[in-house]
Amino acid sequence: MKDFIEVKRYIEIILRRWPVLVIAILLGWLGATLYTNSLPVIYEAKAVLIVGNSIASKPELRDIQVGENLLETYAILSKSQIVLESAISKLGLSESVQDLQGMINAQPIDDTQLLEIAVRGEDSESIVTIANQVANQLVKSSNSGVFGDLDAEQSEFIDRELKNLQVKIEQAYQTVDELQNEYLDAEINKREEIDRQLDLISGRLTQWEDTYADLLDFQQSTQDNFLAIVDSAVLSTNPVSPLPVLNLIAGIVGALGLAVAGLFLFENFDDTVRAESEVFVDKIRLPFLGSIQKRPFVRSGFSGLNLSSDELESYQMLQSSLLFSIQERDSRSLFLTGVLQEAGELSLVNSLGLTMSQSGYKTLLLGFGTNGHGMKKTLNSSKLPENDILLELDNFNLDIQNSNSGVDNLDLISIGRDQGLKSLSEFKRAITQILEKAFSHYDLVLICGPSIATSAEGMIVAKLVDGVALIISEGITKKSVLHQTVDNLRKGDVNLIGGVLVKE
């Protein structure tokens, strides 16, 4: 369950910050495009050579090892100074040996006797010429004995010696046969002489056969060293670098990876509430009353609070949750306040009051401090009707105004506390009197502000009402402050019924 919540939280982060990901994709695309355009266009030409005459139908381990060693050797020799100097001289190139070594890559083709010489450069025609010339010079050097191959004189000598040895061996075997036949008819003293001759011939025969085998192996190894061009390099119109598609994919994926990592890092250090689970599931575990979409503050009066069908449904669900939480109370007074001065708090309370009045509840909205003055701006009537709720408050130094909201079943009292108020006890007594009077005239009293975390008045009001609901603004409310406020309310004599999440 915990893992599911974590995955859900990560998905919420990504969905909430999708504009950042879109910007990252655009930046990745732009960066990859600029990078690709800044790179030179590189072409590649390849020449293929074969090493050795052929592969036996059933090659031995030695044959395979010799072939592999020759391929690796020729791959190294293709970049040797003697080969490249010959190619430079032949073509009249301005490049140095070191320049060509950086352009050439020679490597065996797997499971074959083929060697591939690849040359890369910006001039497609020049690299074809260089690839072919390097291949030609490598073959020429190999056949001329520069790298230890046999020249014509050495090859002729070995052939002559092999023929001579072959004749001697055949004659020796013939002599052995004759002596063995003579041995059968010879007398005893003659047989001893024949034995000595056979021993002598056998020793020479063994020596000649060993020499013959060594010369034959040596000759075979030089024949395996054969090198020839199979495919000459040809002109290619398709560059091997840069690769726009690959660079684009790498740029976008890299930018997205950095963006996602940055988002998660930012979220880990961000102390504001970003998801319902952070408040109602994780450590705080505040009861969930509902979520409301943030809407701008309306200054044209309650008549301007035109709720959409979805908004009206959200407020009706919130109304049901709030009333259910205080159903066992004799009176019905609710204190809706933010941990600090939350964005969307006043608009939420006004809309909730409108919803409750339309549901048939005679409702009083009571605003304090800044919120109270904000409520006065929502009034569409400058007329102040008489109300006996205020008759007993003349002894308190409070700035109190009462007005009809212009909506049936909905009235408003706004209170701006004067600095001349002598003590919090006087404030408490004044609010107590207002609530006592209100309960005889209204079905519901909704109180907005003051802040529960930054003012002593907020805690006083919280202890006088039937229930307190915290307004939590997504992206604004600090989790650390919220956690401390909830702890303080739970330790005090306060009926904390839950929280309302105002979504961005």
Image: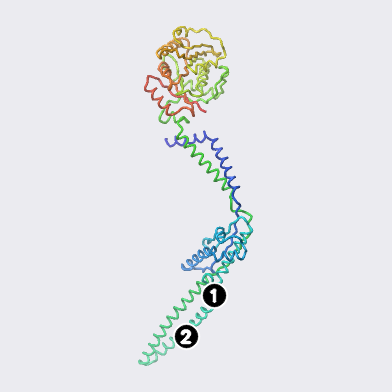
Frontmost residue, 426 versus 441: 426
Q: Which residue is mark 1?
A: 151
* In the displayed structure image, the side of residue 163 where residue 89 appears, left or right: right
Determine the residue positioned at 47% across, 83% down: 170
* In the displayed structure image, the side of residue 316 where residue 204 appears, left or right: left
Q: Quadrant of the N terminus?
A: top left
**Is residue 439 shown above or below 316?**
above
Look at the image and tell me whether residue 77 can be seen.
Answer: yes
* In the displayed structure image, the side of residue 33 where residue 438 appears, left or right: left
Tell me the amino acid under the disc marked 1.
Answer: Asp
Look at the image and tell me whether residue 362 can be seen.
Answer: no
Q: Which residue is mark 2?
A: 171
Frontmost residue, 275 versus 414: 414
Q: CA distance from mark 1 to mark 2?
A: 31 Å
- Give the class, few, some or many, for how many residues have Cα within 10 Å of label 2's Cα (few <14, many ≥20): few
Determine the residue positioned at 41% across, 21% down: 496
What element does badge 1 sit on? Answer: loop
**Is residue 483 shown above or below 358?**
below
Residue 381, percent across and down?
57, 12
What element does badge 2 sit on? Answer: helix
